[in-house]
Amino acid sequence: MPSAKNRTAKKETTARRSSKKSGSKNRWVAKVTTDSTHPPEGLFTKGAATIAKTLASKEVSPKGPASGMRMLTYYINRAGKSLTASDRTRLAKAKILLSKSVPRKRERRTA
């Protein structure tokens, strides 16, 4: 059975670890430095259908609509809490429209 001293030390370590995670202002998306394809200026301020259509195009996403989906997700993550509710809704709708154009792998039948 652990002594009272060991239990106290363990609680303090756990408390420090959890407060570090919750109080952190740094986000992984802020550290990303990439220079891949870039969507047109002001694209994410337009309508959901326009965003989905543009991100699915070969000019913006040469590797296909899945690449456009990653760009949209990255933008949403990067904007974080600064997105308004209406912007978040519009971008979520664009994400749904874009996901319909992303080809999916066929499921294997096991019998």
Image: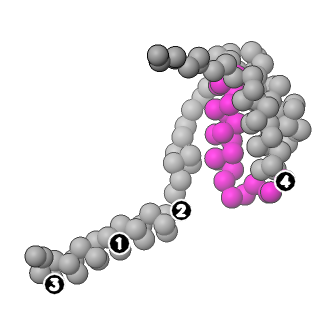
What is the CA distance from the residue labelled 3 to the residue labelled 4? 53 Å
Label 2 with label 3: CB-CB less than 8 Å = no
State the residue in front, 46 or 3. 3
Q: Quadrant where the N terminus lies?
A: bottom left
Give the residue type at disc 4: Ser
Q: Please state which of the two labelled residues, at mark 2 or mark 1, is closer to the viewer.
A: 1
Task: Name the residue carrying label 2.
Answer: 25
Quick one: label 2 or label 3, which is nearer the N terminus? 3
Give the side of residue 78 with respect to residue 91, left or right: left
Alpha carbons under labels 3 and 1: distance apart: 19 Å
Q: Are marks 3 and 1 in contact (CB under 8 Å)?
A: no
Residue of label 4: 86
- Mark identifier at residue 4: 3
How far across and how far down the image is residue 51, in percent?
82, 32
Considering the numbered disc 4 on the image, is that residue within a helix, a strand or a loop?
helix
Residue plotted at (75% across, 22% down):
101
Identity, as a three-letter code, of the amino acid under mark 2: Lys
The mark nearer the N terminus, 2 or 1, is: 1
Residue 86 x/y as whole percent: 84, 53
Of labels 4 and 2, earlier in sequence is 2
